[in-house]
Amino acid sequence: MLITVSGPPGSGKSTNAAQLADALGLGHVSGGDIFREMAAERDMTPVEFNEFAEEDPQIDRDLDRRLREIAVDRDDVVLESRLAGWLAADHADFRFWFDAPLSVRAERIAEREAKPVDRARTETERREASERKRYEEYYNIDIEDLSIYDAAYNTARWGPERFLDVLVATVEAYDPADDEGKSPVEGVVYDF
């Protein structure tokens, strides 16, 4: 089984994807962890690295190629990144989108990164604008188009334990005999 988890920064992708993988006995691959490692290797913050990536398309392409290869070649994994659902396309058994209000996401990021909430909010807005621009330019992906996802959740509506219950119940309730087809991923240019 291949499950993708996508969503904006601070939406709970990493936390919930790791917990879901653990609950289902699957591996977990985080695009955010890979991206932050790449930023640290260049002594940059994720925001600085995002903006740098606007000038060097190979950064995104290297990361996205790795994620696409994982989606195509591996099973029994929860693949988590902003583009995981798009990159995995029809290889994914489930494609989840997580979100939360910007104020909630900024608070989560501020706590995680030990910075003021206002700064986290400003950086998050800059980061999202930067990524939105690049995804459209490189791959013809409109990150705001949620039509490819099997389920979209506002993670601010449940506590962490209850939300994990919701996710596990969603996956366990799946019956292939009732499946009338997933939303196709069309128009994406996988030009890595």
Image: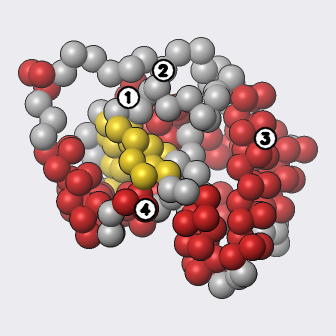
Residue 185 numbered mark, or none = 2
- Residue at image location 79% in from the left, 55% down from the top: 126
Q: Closer to us: mark 2 or mark 1?
A: 2
Vertical placement of residue 74 versus 113, above or below:
above
Q: Report the residue marked by disc 3.
A: 58
Q: Is residue 187 left or right of residue 93?
A: right
Q: Report the residue marked by disc 1.
A: 91
> Which amino acid is tagged 2?
Val
> Which amino acid is tagged 4?
Ala
Helix, strand or loop for disc 4: helix
Crowding near the residue tagged with mark 2, few <14, some 14–19, many ≥20 C-alpha atoms within 10 Å? some
Point out residue 151 in the picture as x, y percentages from the top left corner: 35, 38
Q: Closer to us: mark 3 or mark 2?
A: 2
Whichever of callouts 3 and 1 sits on the residue coming sooner in the sequence is 3
Q: Closer to us: mark 4 or mark 3?
A: 4
Q: Report the residue marked by disc 4.
A: 156
The quadrant of the picture occupied by the C terminus is: top right
Whichever of callouts 4 and 1 sits on the residue coming sooner in the sequence is 1
Vertical placement of residue 41 versus 114, above or below:
above
Q: Nearer the viewer, residue 19 or 91?
A: 19
Q: Nearer the viewer, residue 122 or 14?
A: 122
